[in-house]
Amino acid sequence: MVGQLKPEKGLLLIAILLVFLLLVALVPALSVLIGVLIPVPLIFVYIRFGRRPGLILLASIFVVLFTLLGPRQATLFLTEYAVLVGVMAEAIRFKLSFDKCISFSALVSAILSIVLLLFVFTDREVTLLEFFQKQIDAHFAQSIESLKAVGDKSEELRVVQDFADKTSGSLAQAYPSFIVLGTFLTALINYYATRFLWRRIYGYDIFHEDRFSGWVIPDQVIWVLIGSSAVFLFADNALGSIGINLLLMTIVAYFIQGIAITIYFLESRNVPVFFWILMFFVILLQPLLVGVSVGLGVFDTWMDMRKVRVTGKQNT
């Protein structure tokens, strides 16, 4: 059972929402960061008051956006936020493990977004792949302009431009995986932000007890990594696009498993949180360490450094 929401804690939740809105109004640059956290209060309300009030809230926001801003913004809210909120809140209410809560909500939202894009571009002169490439080129152009603003040398800018020219086509083929991974990151942030907020107001009783440090990828996924790598290297056209998308998503999954292994050893040695933050900051800034984390996740399939597979077999 969920505890009663005390008035002072309810005021705290309202204050947090007002601070979010104030930051967006005063600092437009923070709008993207705040936008990622929009599902948090919606998930919280859905869990706290139940399915019917939660769905009524989502439907009301959709109608308001449709009326004031038009069908495009309302549809974006539906695919990027409403579906994610509904699926994640239901998964949390059924006390599914954190990986299922995050994966189910991210996949449903991402698939709906991709299907919507396919529907929109079916009868247009511009193909979906051309649309993806335009998005990639726009991101590269924005990055180059940012480098110019900070005074980078012309040689460095030329290297970035050459890289953009050579890779934009391949990255356009991988754009669906970017949508999936972006949705996954949004789901991950919102799950843990909601859990943090719920813990401060109620307690941990509604969330599954599994720890992130014990998360493990099924052993069979290694064949997806091997197969997608082969398809990406030796196939072209549509098959090659499928290969590169599966390959990127599998690499990210093994990177996350590598991070889970790192957290396991940090927890087992009671390393202070400050050093956690410092370590992950360095890992994300160093491509070599990112590769090491991916390799750690892959080799754990055979090494089982946390002995989680042994424990699982003993429990069965």
Image (tube, rainbow, N blue to C red):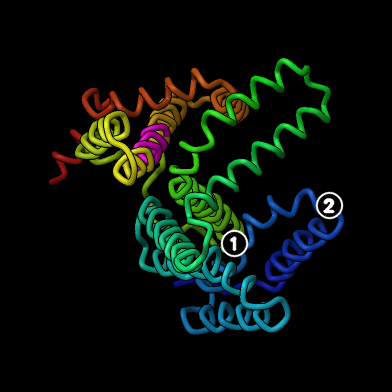
Which residue is found at the position 35% from the left and 60% from the top?
96
The quarter of the picture where residue 251 lies is top left
Which residue is found at the position 42% from the left and 37% from the top?
252
Q: What stretch is highlighted in magenta?
A: 246-255
Contact, mark 2 vs mark 1 (Cβ under 8 Å)? no
* Crowd rating for badge 1 (residues with CA inside 10 Å; few <14, some 14–19, many 20+): many
Which residue is found at the position 18% from the left and 33% from the top?
310
Residue 254 falls within the magenta-colored stretch: yes
- What is the number of the mark on residue 40? 1
Residue farthest toward the front in the current orientation of the protein: 125
Question: Picture coordinates of residue 210 (x, y %)?
Answer: 36, 48
Question: Picture coordinates of residue 132 (x, y %)?
Answer: 53, 49
Question: Picture coordinates of residue 121 (x, y %)?
Answer: 49, 64
Looking at the rendered image, the quarter that the N terminus falls into is: bottom left
- What is the number of the mark on residue 302? none
Q: What's under tag 2, amino acid-wise?
A: Val
Q: Going by the image, does 284 lie left or right of 313?
A: right
**Residue hosting label 2:** 27
- Residue 265 or residue 8, whichever sits in front: 265
Q: Distance between the residues labelled 2 and 1?
A: 20 Å
Eyeballing the image, is 12 above or below 219? below
Which secondary structure type mostly characterizes the magenta part of the structure?
A: helix
